Every structure is written in structure tokens, then in C-alpha cells.
Amino acid sequence: MKRKSAFIKFNIRKRAFLIFAVLFCNFITLNSSLNSFILEEVVKFDSLDDRWAVIIGISKYKDKNLNLEFADNDAKFFHNSLINKCRFKNEQIKLLLNENATYENIRKNIDGWLFKNSKKIDKVIIFFSGHGTQDLDNNKDKRDGYDEFLVPYDFDDNDISSAIRDDVFAYWINNLRSENILLIFDSCYSGGAARAKGFNHIKIKGEIKVDSFVKDIFKELPKEGVALIGACKDNQFSYEADEYKMGVFTYFLIESLNKKSDRNLDNKLTIDEIFQDLKPDVLKYSKKKFNREQEPILISTFKYPFELVYLPIEIKKSSDTNNKEIENIIKQSIFSHDIRRKILLLEEAIKINPMHSQARLYLADAYLKYKIYDEALYNYEILLSLNKNIYSKYFIYKKISYLFEEKGEIEKAIIYIRKAIEQKKEDYDYYNQLASLLNKNSELDEAIKTYLISLNMNNRQREAYFELGRIFIKQEKYDEAISIIEKGININPDYYENYYLKGLLYKYVKKDEKIGNALIEKFHKMDNYVNVMFLNSDLFLKEEKIRNIIIKSAERSIKSDEFFIEPYVRLIKIYTELQKDFNKAKKYYEELIYQYPFLKNNKEINSLVKNIPSIQNNFEK
């Protein structure tokens, strides 16, 4: 059985070559160092939450003339590999086989389920094993005059719109928020192969150079964050192997997800490494078995390496050999201002001694700073495994908690900071981090209890009083808020944020504008870092460039100091009166009212949002 794919070869990324060069230069050192280890145990890791996949395999078509033998096996085995080797959760994979792989089901799962669930930093895989075909270009955007298609289960030979056009598929992919999307195709698109499978509607005169599915997709996709691996070049066939009961390409793809593909010995497999391992195997097998070449191809616009597999780590005892070399590399990394070079240096240190805790910690921190979260988590997990003393794991748990907070997974962040507190009960800073997370998760009563525990441990914490005051305001417990804020001021009169909160309460709750304004003015005099771009008069707002600067300035201020009222008011005013973006205006209004419920009845704020229908209805009620 034949399937053909049309993809283009893309240069392997510079970083992969650089890592390989570093490995080669240190090969002898590596061997001598690794030989000194004594095996203790193997560490395996849990599934990750930031991985999603749609796996499609069609052997049995509605039109039986199109049937293949092993495409559904390809999908099943690849699905199992994602769970067993690539840390995917079963519930975060959609497996569409045969009659379930209709046009509409494929659309719903890519443009619906994946779109809804996957986030910007998540890794996404879409795998298709089945038929592809060609037909005349419908919008004259292809040089060769043809579009390529994926063929779903319910394809109708008399209706090309029942197949998935490359432009449509690209539109679905382009809609996804993820910036780490891997597309894998074991299918074919040539006119000859299509006719052999019954697609007689294609009219071809003489020889043509078949345009590729990949090229057409990439015309529509972002420049970064997508890679495609295809089973063969556009003038070749993709074969099925009776002995494996699978497609040749998919069989060697799955085979490559193991230690032998780890070219730089870092216990991680990138897409580049996997491709470099499977490509020669597919070529060799196709030449021997079919006397024809099947050469897989790769095109990638990934900004960062796409690590698909984290191999089990062997935790070993080692001597102190090469510690000086590692220390020198760590020093170089510390003084390097280039984050990429910092990471490469630390990866080099890890290769010399994978059990070096300090190098591993610096590496994890570097990945976290660079927002490569799965890599950071992977290295923190190894640190937890290396550390046998349970009472010193709290520091790593705290780091992991912060990592999940950065990802926006607050509930997981809470779980890990609680693990840290179990081992570090005497440190009030850990309670503060937990209280902050509980506050973000709208568990306000628990947040209050936790801050009070922290203050019992150290009653001179200026920020804890401030945050407690903010929570009491959210709960509309204004007397408690004033009381706790005044305690904070008495203990530390230099913490000026407390003056701001107290000023707001006097101005808007106690209706004493004189005292309120004096306290707010005192805050502004003491705060040398407040960005006043959004405090300027309205004269410049009509200038679009200046207005955009003010918007960015206000948004940055909210991100760093969300307690500050003025940037919210400025943004609400801009989005209601000038930009006419009522959804954004409503968003900022709701955030402001959540923090300061007493502003619900403020005439100035209400006058700004009076034209937003959903808010206007609330006023009327």
C-alpha cells in the first residue's frame, strides 16, 4: 500500500549543531567521568499538563476503494508512545480512528478542543496517517495551480470540499495559541498516487512538479513556533510494512523515541535529534525492501528546541573528579549576560557530571527565567531525586510553586508551596507565598489565616499588613482593613503603599476627602518609582502614538502594582471614549471593582462605563 507526502527539507537548527560540537570536544572527558559513576536507581517522571495532541489514523474509509491496512495502527502506537515515552496525559490526547475521523470530527478537535484548551506555552502535536490528494487551486494562490488535501473518513470522490484543503488546515493551526506546534504527516499528495487510489477527478497533462502540502501550509502560518515532519519527499511514496503492521515512517518515528537518538547525551530528545535518527533508518529500509527511496523531511520554525522525550535519569554516586572544570563553567555562566550562552554552558556542565546539584539548579533557574517551563520543571524534578535529605527539598518545592504560578496554574502552585511548608514550618516567607496564592485563587478567608500565621512569626512585615488590608477591602470589611493598615504604618512608617490604601478608604468609604487626598499625596511623594504617564492630562490622548504609549505604560503598571487605581481609570477611559473597545473596558472595570468594591457607587467611574450595556443593566438593577 502506498501513501505519499510532500514536504521540504529544512536546515537543522544551529543550536543542535553547537551542542553536538560541544559534546564532541568533551567526548573523552565525558566517558572518563561517566565511568566513575556507580548505579543507584532510575528516576522516572510524571505526566505533564502542558502537552496536547490530536492523533488521526484512517485505514477503513467510507469509500472502501481507498482502504489502507495499517494507518489506524500508526495512530494507535503513536498514541501509546506519547503516553509512555513523552509524558502526555491520556485525557489530553484525542485519538480519532477510521469512522471517527470524519471531516467534522477532525475540525472540532483541532479548531475546537485544541483551540479551547492549549495555551501559548503548551506543546501541541497533530499526527495524521492516511490518504492525501490534490485538486485544482480554488483561489489561485499556488504557482502550480493545485491545492493539497488531507482525506478524512467520509471523503466523497465527487465533492473535493469533503477533503481538508491545505489553506483550511493552516487556518485551524494558525488559530491555536500555542507557539510549540508539531505536525506529523504519514500521507501522500502526488497526482499519480492519487489516481492509483481512485481519485480520478484530477486532470494532469504531462509531467508536473508537485507543490507540497508543507509549503502551502507554511504560506499561511506564523514564522515561528511550528514544525512539520513528513514521511517522504513530494516525488516519493510513503510505504506500509507488513512485518511491522505499520507505516514504515511511523514505525521508525516511534523507534527513534529512545536513548539511541540522544546524540548529545543530555537525557532529552529534541525533534531535531529524533528526525536525524529516523531519517537514515527509513531510507535504508525503503531501499532494501522496495528498491525505492522514501526520505522523510523536516521543516521547523521553532524559536526554542522542542523537547519531546525526557529519558529516565540514572541517579549515580560519583567521585569529585572534574568538579573544578564544572565550577569554572558555572562561573562563566554566572557572568554571561546572554541567556542562551548561559544555558549552553550549564548544559555542558551537566554532561560532565549529570549529578552536580549546583549546576542542575542554576540550569533549572535559567530555564525558568527564560520561561521554558517544562525544561525548568524537568531539572527541578531531577534535583528532588538527587536530594535524599527530605528536609532540604523545601527550597526546590518553593521554586516549582513559583514556576506553576508563572504558568498561571495557581492550584498546582498552592500544592507545591504547601509541600515546602511541611518541611520548612518556621519560615514566614513561605506562608506569605502561600497566602498570596490563596488570594489569587479567591480563597480569601484561607489567605487571611495564612497571613496571620506569618505575622505571628514576625510582626514587622510591612507587606503582609498591606496585603491583609487589600483582602479585607475585597471582602468589604473596611474597619478591619483600616485597623490592619494602621498597624502596618505604626510598625513601619516608611512602607508608603499602606498610606495609599488608607487614603482610598478615607476618601471613598469614610467620605473624608481632605484626609484621604493628603494620605494619597503623601504616597506619591514617597514613591519615587510610580510611572506617571497615565496621570497626564487628556490633551495628548488624541495622538494615537502617545495614546499607545500611555496604554502600554498603564498595563505595565497594573502588572507590577495592581493595587494602583489610576492606570485602571485611564485604561477604562481610553477604551470607552477613544478606542471603543468595550470588552477591554469592561475587563479593567471588573478587575478594579473586584479589588475595590467601594468604587461601584463612584460617580466618576460609573460615568466612564455608562455606555457599556452589560454594566448599564447592573446599574439599573
Image: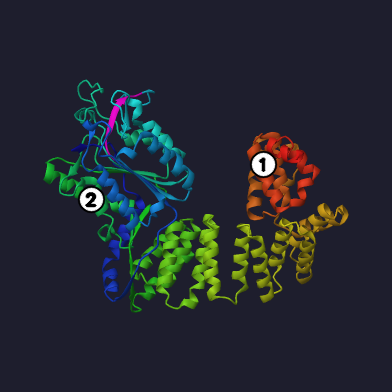
Going from N to C along the chain, the mark reached first, 1 or 2, is 2
Q: Is residue 142 magenta?
A: no
Q: Amino acid at mark 1?
A: Lys
- Describe the element under mark 2 as helix, strand or loop: helix
Looking at the picture, how far across and down is residue 203, in whole percent? 24, 21
Q: Rate crowding at label 2 as few (under 14), some (14 to 19) or many (20 or more) other CA atoms within 10 Å.
A: many
Foreground residue, 347 or 307?
Answer: 307
Task: Give the labeled residue for mark 2.
Answer: 252
Q: Dividing the image into 4 quarters, which one contains the N terminus?
A: top left
- Describe the element under mark 1 as helix, strand or loop: helix
Looking at the picture, how far across and down is residue 113, in whole percent? 45, 43
Which residue is drawn at the image coordinates 67% and 63% (left, top)? Answer: 445
Task: Give the labeled residue for mark 1.
Answer: 586
- Quarter of the image holding residue 498? bottom right
Q: Amino acid at mark 2?
A: Phe
When the figure is inspected, residue 512 is found, relative to residue 582, above or below; the finding is below
Foreground residue, 416 or 142?
Answer: 416
Residue 438 in view? yes
Looking at the picture, how far across and down is residue 71, in whole percent? 25, 42
Q: Is the Cβ of the residue at disc 1 closer than 8 Å to that at disc 2?
A: no
Judge from the rendering whether residue 132 lies leftward or rightward of residue 368; answer left or right.
left
Q: Which residues are magenta?
A: 129-137
Foreground residue, 322 or 178?
Answer: 178
For the residues labelled 1 and 2, the Cα–Cα distance comes to 53 Å
Residue 85 in view? no
